[in-house]
Image (tube, grey):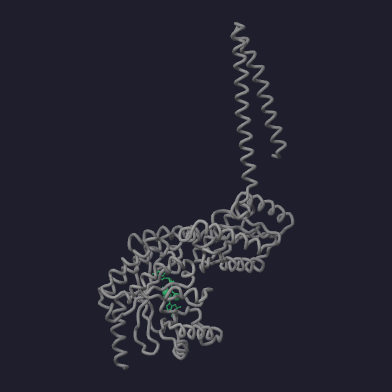
Amino acid sequence: MSPKANAALLTTIYLVAGLAWIFMSDRALLELVDNSALLTTLQTFKGASYVLVTAIMLYILIYVALKRERRLSEDDSLTHLLNRHMLRQQLDSQLLVCRKNDKPLVLMLINIDDFKQINSNLSMHAGDEFLKSVADEMREQFKRQVILGRISGDEFAVVLPGAIWPEDVIPEAEQLQERIRHINIEELDELQMTACIGISMFPADGENSKELINSASLALEEAKAHGPGCIRSYKLKLQETATERARLLLDLKSAITNQHLSVVYQPQFGASTQRITGVEVLVRWHHEADGWIGPARFIPLAEQHGLICSITDFVMQTAIKELIDADLLYTDIHRVSFNVSAADFNSDKSEERFAKNLAALPGDWSVAQFELTETAALMNMPAIRKVLNSLTQRGVQVSLDDFGTGYSSLSTLRQLQMQELKIDQSFIADIASNPNDAQIVRTILAMAKALNLRVIAEGVETSSQANFLIKEGCQELQGYLYARPMNIDQLVNFLKNHTKTTTKQS
Ligand code: C2E
Ligand code: CA
Ligand code: CA
């Protein structure tokens, strides 16, 4: 109903009710009271209560109207982008235009990965400054007719009327991620923030603002579940995936409590000696109904929902115990590598937790190595540096996992005092056939040599890959060509046979 019609209706109701009340109540009083003095008092009282009731009604009406007006007009006071409410309103009006002109529309929801670490590790002020910078970057990038909003703490929205999927959208999304990565505010130091983006489209994914926001939120959840810096668009199937993920999360919680997780070990080898130099510990989950579920599927979920510390603790404690019980540690195996996540370093207790897990080692802590991905390192550099500094002083080694896939400058990463670079398997896969990949690997090797870092290549599957790596001076190799991940009993057997062959060979 229009404001005019609304006002007319309310006034008419008031007029009818008011006049009815005056006539009926006067009549009733005349019928009931015959003492004129009492009648006058009652009429005065009746008039006063009428004024009181209408005053209260007037107050409520004005209060509700003003409050609504204020909420509607308010932009987000921190970033001066549209707030959620206004964004929805403007999105709905744009949808009307698009529907009329038969044009598509795209909604992007942007969420800053692990934003809370800025507030908790740096300061609320740094958090605010960062959010303001994101808004500035958005304004800078989207100068043309788009709608920009901040719909909750660290969640932003961009509405692109008329945009064509995917050619107009993906480059914009990637450029925005790049801008966010390069935001450089004082307190942020060299910390690089990443963002996940969820995308929905009109008319395919929703008819109105509510449906489009829901679809984009699901796409965003899906992106977050795949790790930091991902982009996902909504597909009908995502509704199922979201339900499926909720189920998986519940099951994962119970798997952690009921110890349905286990660990496997993948041996690593000296390139020239072909002897075992260490093992990487990898977590496994045997799901009662679905069978084995790979860590690539559940580790991002665990990171997102605060379960990673329990998993890391389990993996470290189990591997150390199994390796000691099998009498392998410090005898056949001199290095055991644990994968750790950025979220492992978020709490004040991180250092204490790691130290407690490592305290189970009967000897020197230098047998333990933490594998940290380049992206994780950059996500949480100040906290990670603090925790790792104290652990490395006690001998713990650090390896930079998936090296080459991030956007880091090595000078930033050097703050971590690592001993090893682990070249990502994506570069190894085509090393023998793709000159670009071969050149990247050569460059990494040269750089590592200059910095006195050990290099290990992961995902080595063929002898031509191994030969290339050995020729170029890579010190260690890991991959299916040599050994697949195996449980502790298989590792014991593998070591027995392996020692026999290497002794025979030498
Ligand atoms: P990652 O750290 O890069 O681990 C290497 C992955 O590559 C492992 O997969 C391993 O089984 C696989 N792999 C090893 N050699 C080859 C090969 O020659 N060819 C191919 N195609 N693959 C090979 P997995 O066990 O599925 O682990 C996947 C990822 O999950 C790991 O990648 C790591 O990021 C994460 N992850 C595994 N265990 C843990 C854990 O205990 N904690 C944390 N935070 N993350 C873990
Ligand atoms: Ca690893
Ligand atoms: Ca890796």
| Residue 462 spot, x, y in % from top left | 45, 86
Which residue shows up at 31% across the image and 80% down it?
Answer: 333
Quadrant in the picture for the N terminus: top right
| Residue 489 spot, x, y in % from top left | 29, 76
Which residue shows up at 43% across the image and 68% down it?
Answer: 384
| Residue 159 spot, x, y in % from top left | 65, 58
Q: Residue furthest right?
A: 101
Quadrant in the picture for the C terminus: bottom left
Q: Is residue 203 visible?
A: no
Q: Is residue 152 above or below residue 338?
A: above
Left or right: 284 as drawn, with respect to 90:
left
Q: Residue furthest front?
A: 186
Which residue shows up at 54% across the image and 64% down it?
Answer: 186
Q: Nearer the viewer, residue 371 or 247?
A: 371
Q: Nearer the viewer, residue 423 or 379?
A: 379
Q: Nearer the viewer, residue 187 or 107?
A: 187
Q: Quadrant of ligand 3?
A: bottom left
Q: Is residue 72 visible?
A: yes
The quadrant holding residue 297 is bottom left
Q: Is residue 318 above or below residue 442?
A: above
Left or right: 31 as drawn, with respect to 295:
right
The quadrant holding residue 327 is bottom left
Left or right: 125 as drawn, with respect to 456:
right
- Numbered marks: total: 0
| Residue 155 spot, x, y in % from top left | 56, 57
